[in-house]
Amino acid sequence: MANAEHSGRPAEAFGSTAVGTARARLRATRLGLWLVAAVLAVRQVAVVLGTPRGERLTDLETWVGPDGVLHVKGSLYDSTRFTGTPFGGLVLKPLTRSAEQALGWGWTFGTLLLVVALGLVVARALPQPVSRRTALLAAPVAISLLMLSLPVRNTLWLGQTSIIPVLLVLLGCFVARDWRAAGALIGLAAALQPTVLLFAALLWFTGRRRAAAATGATFAGVTALAWAAMPHDSYTYWVHHMAGVGLGGKADALANQSLHGALLRLGVSGPLEIGLFLALGATVATLGVRRAVRYAHDGQILLAVALTGCAAITVSPTTWQHQLLWVLLAVVGRVGKRASDRYVWPVAVILVMTLPAKMMLPNMAALYPLRDNAVLLAAIAAATVIPFLPRTSPYYRSPIPTEYAPPVPARWKHVPLLPFLQRVLTRPNLLMELLLIRVTYAAYQQVRLAATGGSNSAGRVRAEVHGQQILDLERFLHIDIEHGINHWVVKVDWLRGFFDFYYESFHFVVPLSVLAVLYWRRPVDYRWARSALGFATLLALVGFWLYPLAPPRLMPSLGVIDTVHGVQDFSKPDYGTLTALTNQYAAMPSLHFGWSLWCGLVIAIVAPKWWMKALGLLHPFFTVSAIVATGNHWVLDAAGGAAVVLAGFGLSYALMGPRAGVASVPERASAEPAVPEKDPAPS
């Protein structure tokens, strides 16, 4: 044994085993990510091809179908249905002879292959240095994000060509080895989408002047070719429609995420709008190209391309949803000195590019300008103001580390199940928290509504059957007190007013207040409490989905008075539909009581004084009284709410371990990481 120890063989064997295990895990992770990308691709194709003809590939059908714009004789622009350049029409015209069904399938799978190629090029173009793990996992992650993004989904649905210019630019910047090929590829992209000419400026100011000249020459050549082949159409596009301003849908439509569209939506029109558009567009283009040149010299070529694309989106007269992929590419930029801040920008970009704008911001009139122009604002911010870190920054590779509280011993050996979820001492990024809370609540609303088939009337019969089951069970248990309490409270005006006010006012105010206080004063407890609340809400959504339940006020034969919402007209099919986005049959479990119980338990655990604990526990008591007295819940709904909250705390404990409590702060890691060696200058 001594000889074995000194020879080092056991250590070598152990090391080789560890390396082999790590490689196996990496292969499994990579395979899983490719599987996710494949599933997303299959789903997108199935959604498109499974939609009845006439509702899918509508733009493609408009162009190349039996009666499409490209098929009939005459001008491409006799109507505003074709929005491409004359060169785009010249390229697409041969497709009009293809069979309609074959063209639909071929176009869809061809677009899918373009998305895969785009993801592979993006993964190859990541700014160096990247680890082997990142390099292996980047391609499936990039393809998955592209498949989920609104521009790709919109492109597949409509049968558009907008992925082609993006791919041509990336091929010209990262794959083409010769300046002629690079210029030709980007020039072709500009011929299909004219604002891509902005990349000629990027090439010029980064020293690739031959490629910039080739870009301009290619653009001019193919545009002249299209002018010679279709002079009338070319005149209509470049002169009469002023580079496409008059084409497609209305310029002030929400789908037009350009400065021109935003100004029109804000009510600015005429010469003032044109002047503002030109001035603001020139400013964004100038700042965007300058910043792109700076990051290109820093070796972050993909970020430079993304910023130039964001500027092109802004200055284009019309930028439809399927033309917004440039914003998603800006996710590669690194923002923030702290490790905890590093994820804010990529998460924000991914959410903006994958979710409807209504899920990002509340439905408030004051926020409509932000909500209606969310992608445009993200593009402008990326091009002009987001402080992306240069590779020369000491924080680029080594951000200020996150501080963790010492782990608390658990009662069971295998707890926590996810030991990497340590207790973070510092506050999480506020913007990230607000964004995730908003998106999570919007998803919660959508799931609640979908639980009954998209409307309250769709699940009415089933919900009333379940309501009768709950009533029968309560009668068996002798706790069917809802009718008696409801009619007694109705007779006492001040008590009815108190419970109505409590029901309507404190459901959101108190949980948000508790979260805000914990965020500011007790960051460690904030993460623990937030996780428990999230788990409880997720479990409640499962309950809403599996067991839609009519509350007492919506049981026609029970005679309970709805003190909050007023008298319901049971003769109408949608009598329970109080709002378009609320499932009135999401009663089991009661999150009104569940969230209030969560508040009471958190306050009782965290509060330093006994009277604070007692005051916190009064909230769930008043809440359960209010939900029963107003006829909005059964007593057993409150029991269900208590069950999911306790389960939420249990899951938090099992996955993350015990609450850290008041722990001594470890020595603060150095705020100034060592300056890494400079990377070799980019070629």
Image (spheres, rainbow, N blue to C red):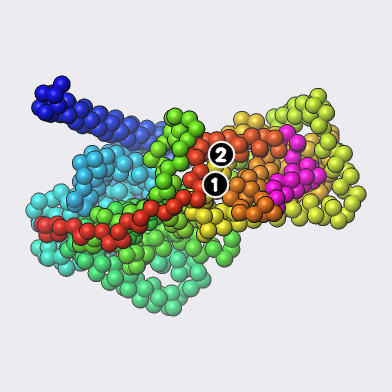
Q: Residue 349, position in %: x, y? A: 39, 54
Q: Residue 478, position in %: x, y? A: 83, 28
Kind of residue indicated by mark 1: Ala
Q: Residues within 10 Å of mark 1 (few under 14, many from 20)?
A: many
**Residue at the image point whose x is 89% and y is 51% from the top:** 492
Q: Which residues are magenta?
A: 614-637
Kind of element beneath mark 2: helix
According to the picture, the residue beneath numbered tag 1 turns out to be 529
Residue in front for this viewpoint, 275 or 36: 36
Quadrant assignment, res 139 = top left
According to the picture, the residue beneath numbered tag 2 turns out to be 649
Residue in front for this viewpoint, 81 or 431: 431
Asked if residue 277 lies in the magenta stretch, the reply is no
Kind of residue indicated by mark 2: Phe
Quadrant assignment, res 107 = top left
**Residue at the image point whose x is 61% and y is 39% from the top:** 645
Q: Residue 118, position in %: x, y? A: 26, 45
Residue in front for this viewpoint, 253 or 395: 395
**Residue at the image point whose x is 33% and y is 54% from the top:** 401
Q: Identify the residue at the far top of this view.
A: 1
Side (left or right) of 518 relative to 485: left
Q: Quarter holding the C terminus? A: bottom left
Provide the major secondary structure of the magenta segment: helix
Asked if residue 618 lies in the magenta stretch, the reply is yes
